[in-house]
Amino acid sequence: MKKLIAEFIGTLWLVLGGCGSAVIAAGYPELGIGFVGVALAFGLTVLTMVYAIGHISGAHLNPAVSIGLWMGGRFDKKELLPYIAAQVLGGIAGASILYVIASGKAGFELNGFASNGYGEHSPDGYSMTAALVTEVVMTFMFLIIILGATHSKAPKGLAGLAIGLGLTLIHLISIPVTNTSVNPARSTSQAIFEGGWALDQLWLFWVAPIVGAMIAGLLYKYLSPEE
């Protein structure tokens, strides 16, 4: 239960910090942080949680990460579904808090609510195929970074930096394509509030990250198995 509570809190923070930076701060007329700032915000949420709850739950904060770690032989299968449930619920809680805060401004409109999308709902108009490839590859690389940084032979104490900066880089590459998911819980939390097209396209932001994570888990298990 302690692990699940930690995952709930961590994923709440990821959504509130990452999506909150996009919804509240990115477009602010004078101090807008832009998509570079949003990318950094997502990286910082993961970096801070790795050190805050990593020793409790591993700080997965992402169903694709949990699945990738399981495929890589680093995570017990019996904990998989409870972790995913805690992550999705944490993401929804984070999005709920964000909605309450953001809707407190006069003239508030959802405007996508930092949802992920493709086609006409891609930030820069990228196709479904481009979105699918992007999400598979970016999640694959994210899991390679996580599996490598947390390996028993990796330098101790630096995993959080590698993982947080890796997620920042992933967002710098893929925000224009899909608004960056690589995390089904993050995508679900925002799609619930946006509804309509975001829920219709949500399937891609579950399938692609999970596929990318599974491939990475299997490959890294082959490349560098734990003793």
Image (spheres, rainbow, N blue to C red):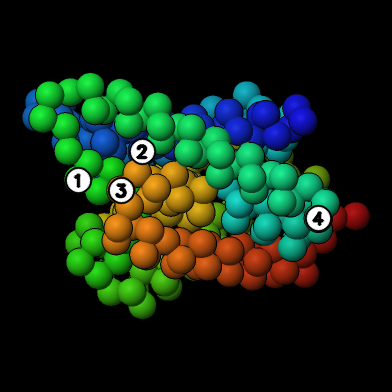
- Look at label 2 and name its amino acid: Cys
Could you give the CA–CA distance between mark 1 and mark 3, rounded to whole angstroms?
Answer: 8 Å
Q: Position of residue 59 (x, y in %)?
A: 64, 37
The 10 Å Cα crowd at callout 3, few under 14, some 14 to 19, many 20 or more, is some
Q: Residue at x 12, y 24 (%)?
A: 106
Disc 4 on helix, strand or loop?
helix
Note whether 103 is above or below 194 in the view shown.
Answer: above
Disc 3 on helix, strand or loop?
helix
- Ranked by sequence position, the earlier of labels 1 and 4 is 4
Look at mark 4 in the image and give the residue it sits on.
77
Look at mark 3 in the image and give the residue it sits on.
194
In the visual, does 144 lie left or right of 102?
right
Note whether 131 is above or below 13 in the view shown.
Answer: below
Look at mark 2 in the image and give the residue it sits on.
19
Q: Residue at x 30, y 23 (%)?
A: 101
- Look at label 3 and name its amino acid: Glu
Q: Position of residue 15 (x, y in %)?
A: 44, 37
